[in-house]
Image (tube, grey):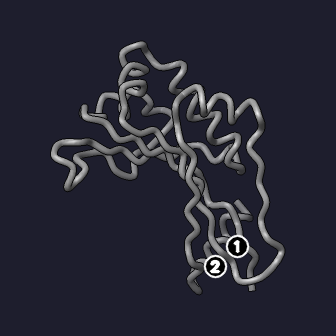
Amino acid sequence: MTSPWFINTDLEITSRRDLSDFVAGLGSTVFALYNGPLEGTGGAFFANLELKSSRWREPDGQIRAFLRAIDRAPTSLREVWERARRRRFCLGFYSGREYPAIELQLRPDTLATIAAAKAEVSIAVYPLEPEDTRTRARTRRS
Protein backbone atom coordinates (compact mmCIF):
# COMPACT_ATOMS: atom_id res chain seq x y z
CA MET A 1 0.00 0.00 0.00
CA THR A 2 1.12 3.58 -0.58
CA SER A 3 0.42 6.96 0.93
CA PRO A 4 -0.36 10.05 -1.20
CA TRP A 5 2.52 11.90 -2.83
CA PHE A 6 3.26 15.07 -4.75
CA ILE A 7 4.06 14.54 -8.45
CA ASN A 8 4.97 17.99 -9.76
CA THR A 9 3.75 21.46 -10.70
CA ASP A 10 2.50 22.29 -14.18
CA LEU A 11 2.30 25.85 -15.43
CA GLU A 12 -0.80 26.30 -17.59
CA ILE A 13 -1.18 29.45 -19.69
CA THR A 14 -4.15 30.45 -21.84
CA SER A 15 -3.83 33.38 -24.22
CA ARG A 16 -5.35 35.00 -27.28
CA ARG A 17 -1.83 34.98 -28.77
CA ASP A 18 0.25 32.05 -29.92
CA LEU A 19 2.50 31.02 -27.02
CA SER A 20 5.25 29.36 -29.09
CA ASP A 21 7.76 32.22 -28.69
CA PHE A 22 7.06 32.37 -24.97
CA VAL A 23 7.64 28.62 -24.57
CA ALA A 24 10.78 28.72 -26.74
CA GLY A 25 12.10 31.66 -24.72
CA LEU A 26 11.90 29.59 -21.54
CA GLY A 27 13.31 26.55 -23.35
CA SER A 28 16.30 25.86 -21.15
CA THR A 29 14.10 25.79 -18.05
CA VAL A 30 10.87 24.13 -19.20
CA PHE A 31 9.46 21.60 -21.60
CA ALA A 32 6.01 21.73 -23.09
CA LEU A 33 3.53 18.94 -22.47
CA TYR A 34 1.29 20.83 -24.92
CA ASN A 35 1.60 24.11 -26.81
CA GLY A 36 -0.99 25.00 -29.41
CA PRO A 37 -4.59 25.94 -30.13
CA LEU A 38 -7.15 25.38 -27.40
CA GLU A 39 -10.05 23.56 -29.02
CA GLY A 40 -13.53 24.98 -28.69
CA THR A 41 -12.40 28.48 -27.73
CA GLY A 42 -12.55 30.31 -31.03
CA GLY A 43 -8.85 31.01 -31.35
CA ALA A 44 -7.29 30.83 -27.89
CA PHE A 45 -3.92 29.18 -27.33
CA PHE A 46 -2.82 26.97 -24.46
CA ALA A 47 0.55 25.87 -23.12
CA ASN A 48 1.09 23.29 -20.39
CA LEU A 49 4.68 23.41 -19.10
CA GLU A 50 6.82 21.47 -16.66
CA LEU A 51 10.28 22.21 -15.31
CA LYS A 52 13.15 20.29 -16.90
CA SER A 53 15.01 20.08 -13.60
CA SER A 54 13.87 17.84 -10.78
CA ARG A 55 15.91 19.91 -8.33
CA TRP A 56 12.79 21.06 -6.50
CA ARG A 57 10.76 18.26 -4.92
CA GLU A 58 7.98 20.45 -3.48
CA PRO A 59 5.52 22.85 -5.12
CA ASP A 60 6.90 25.98 -3.44
CA GLY A 61 10.31 25.60 -5.07
CA GLN A 62 8.83 24.63 -8.42
CA ILE A 63 6.51 27.65 -8.52
CA ARG A 64 9.38 29.95 -7.56
CA ALA A 65 11.56 28.44 -10.33
CA PHE A 66 8.84 29.09 -12.93
CA LEU A 67 8.35 32.67 -11.74
CA ARG A 68 12.12 33.29 -11.64
CA ALA A 69 12.45 32.07 -15.25
CA ILE A 70 9.62 34.35 -16.36
CA ASP A 71 11.05 37.30 -14.43
CA ARG A 72 14.44 36.79 -16.13
CA ALA A 73 12.89 36.50 -19.61
CA PRO A 74 13.14 39.32 -22.15
CA THR A 75 10.52 42.06 -21.89
CA SER A 76 8.65 40.79 -24.96
CA LEU A 77 8.12 37.40 -23.32
CA ARG A 78 7.08 38.91 -19.99
CA GLU A 79 4.48 40.95 -21.90
CA VAL A 80 3.03 37.71 -23.34
CA TRP A 81 2.81 36.38 -19.77
CA GLU A 82 1.17 39.58 -18.49
CA ARG A 83 -1.41 39.63 -21.33
CA ALA A 84 -2.38 35.97 -20.92
CA ARG A 85 -6.02 35.27 -20.08
CA ARG A 86 -5.07 32.72 -17.44
CA ARG A 87 -1.87 31.84 -15.61
CA ARG A 88 -2.24 28.79 -13.39
CA PHE A 89 0.08 26.62 -11.34
CA CYS A 90 -1.46 23.16 -11.13
CA LEU A 91 -0.12 21.04 -8.27
CA GLY A 92 -0.41 17.35 -9.10
CA PHE A 93 -0.78 14.61 -6.52
CA TYR A 94 -1.40 10.87 -6.55
CA SER A 95 -4.11 9.92 -4.09
CA GLY A 96 -2.40 6.94 -2.51
CA ARG A 97 -4.21 4.19 -0.65
CA GLU A 98 -3.26 4.74 2.97
CA TYR A 99 -2.20 7.26 5.59
CA PRO A 100 -0.36 9.41 6.32
CA ALA A 101 -2.00 12.24 4.45
CA ILE A 102 0.32 14.53 2.54
CA GLU A 103 0.81 18.08 3.68
CA LEU A 104 2.86 20.63 1.74
CA GLN A 105 3.13 24.36 2.27
CA LEU A 106 3.47 27.43 0.11
CA ARG A 107 5.47 30.16 1.84
CA PRO A 108 3.84 33.58 2.34
CA ASP A 109 6.35 35.26 -0.01
CA THR A 110 5.61 32.65 -2.68
CA LEU A 111 1.87 33.29 -2.31
CA ALA A 112 2.50 37.05 -2.59
CA THR A 113 4.56 36.51 -5.75
CA ILE A 114 1.82 34.33 -7.26
CA ALA A 115 -0.77 37.00 -6.47
CA ALA A 116 1.44 39.76 -7.92
CA ALA A 117 1.74 37.69 -11.12
CA LYS A 118 -2.08 37.44 -11.22
CA ALA A 119 -1.77 33.67 -11.31
CA GLU A 120 -3.98 30.97 -9.85
CA VAL A 121 -3.14 27.79 -8.00
CA SER A 122 -5.11 24.61 -8.58
CA ILE A 123 -4.77 21.09 -7.24
CA ALA A 124 -5.20 17.91 -9.28
CA VAL A 125 -5.47 14.57 -7.47
CA TYR A 126 -4.98 11.52 -9.67
CA PRO A 127 -6.18 8.03 -8.78
CA LEU A 128 -3.42 5.58 -8.04
CA GLU A 129 -3.11 2.78 -10.57
CA PRO A 130 -1.31 -0.50 -9.74
CA GLU A 131 1.66 0.30 -12.00
CA ASP A 132 2.06 3.74 -10.35
CA THR A 133 3.50 2.12 -7.23
CA ARG A 134 6.40 0.73 -9.26
CA THR A 135 7.00 4.13 -10.90
CA ARG A 136 6.98 5.85 -7.52
CA ALA A 137 9.58 3.47 -6.10
CA ARG A 138 11.89 4.14 -9.05
CA THR A 139 11.54 7.93 -8.91
CA ARG A 140 12.21 8.03 -5.16
CA ARG A 141 15.52 6.24 -5.68
CA SER A 142 16.60 8.69 -8.42
| The image quarter in which residue 104 lies | bottom right
Q: Which amino acid type corresponds to the residue marked 2 in the rendered image?
A: Arg
Dot 1 alpha-carbon crowd within 10 angstroms: few under 14, some 14 to 19, many 20 or more = few
Quick one: 135 or 18, which is closer to the camera?
18
Relative height, residue 82 to residue 57 (above, below)? above
On the rendered image, what quadrant is the C terminus found in?
A: bottom right
- Residue drawn at x 54%, y 28% as measured from the top left: 117
- Residue drawn at x 70%, y 34% as measured from the top left: 110
Kind of element beneath mark 1:
helix
Task: Report the side of 125 relative to 13 (left or right).
Answer: right
- Percent position of residue 92, x then y: 58, 60
Q: Which amino acid type corresponds to the residue marked 1 in the rendered image?
A: Ala
Residue tagged 2: 134
- Percent position of residue 114, x then y: 60, 33
- Percent position of residue 100, x then y: 83, 74
Marks 1 and 2 sit apart, C-alpha to C-alpha, by 5 Å
Residue tagged 1: 137
Relative height, residue 82 to residue 141 (above, below)? above
Relative height, residue 25 to residue 55 (above, below)? above
The answer to whether the residue labelled 1 contacts the one labelled 2, judged by CB atoms less than 8 Å apart, is: yes
